[in-house]
Amino acid sequence: MIENIEEVKNQLKELSEVINSFTSEAVQLRIIDLVFNAQQKKAPDITAQEPEYISPSRSKRKRIKSKVRSLPTDRAANGEGPVSILAKLTTSAFFEQPQSIRSIIEYCEVNFAKKIKQSDISGKLAKMVKEGTLKREKNAEGQYEYSKP
């Protein structure tokens, strides 16, 4: 048994404050290992010592290439993505009346059976406004509506 238990308890209390000041559990465990190893041997030189635990590298898996080419998720089977559908709408009479992004998305869902996210077309709409293909104005609700110039 330990001869001077009270002294050891006080030392452990002081040590626990220092160890708990580190947020990394790995660092805490490393310090505890060093302390207990120091009691068994002379105090090791921490700066010159390499870590005892080195994680084994993961074995590299061979990637099997599929022979079937899958389509990207934002393209329909017919090859029409959100941007090409938007380009079709600009050549049609769709933008004769001002259209909000919500109305464009709903129109695509009904007429093209294509679910489009707002983020898929907002950038292209802004580019078309800069190019002069479309113009943009705010409606009474403060939302932008796009129409032909």
Image (cartoon, rainbow, N blue to C red):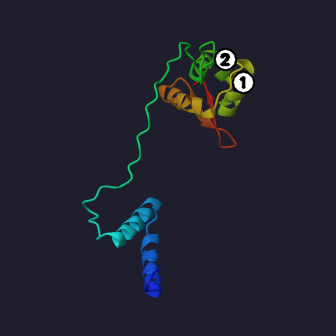
Which residue is the extreme one toward the left? 48
Residue picked out by circle 1? 109
Say which amino acid is labelled 1.
Glu
Name of the residue lying farthest toward the right: 110
Q: Which mark is residue 93?
A: 2
Residue 80: horizontal and vertical position, in percent?
60, 16
Task: Give the mark nearer the N terminus: 1 vs 2.
Answer: 2
Image quarter (top left, top right, bottom left or bottom right) of the C terminus: top right
Alpha carbon distance from label 1 to label 2: 18 Å
Q: In terms of depth relative to the viewer, which is nearer, 143 or 41?
A: 41
**Crowd rating for badge 2 (residues with CA inside 10 Å; few <14, some 14–19, many 20+):** few
Q: Residue at x 72, y 20 (%)?
A: 113
Q: Amino acid at mark 2?
A: Ala
- The number of callouts visible is 2
Q: Position of residue 36 (x, y in %)?
A: 39, 69
Q: Which residue is at a point 69% across and 33% down the rendered structure image?
A: 102
Would residue 60 appear left or right of 138 to someone viewing this image?
A: left
Callout 2 secondary element: loop
Q: Is residue 66 above or below residue 2?
A: above
Reply above or below: 116 against 138: above
Taking the image as shown, residue 116 lies to the left or right of residue 43, namely right
Eyeballing the image, is 108 above or below 35? above
Nearer to us in this view, 35 or 98:
35
Residue occupying the point 43% across, 85% down: 3
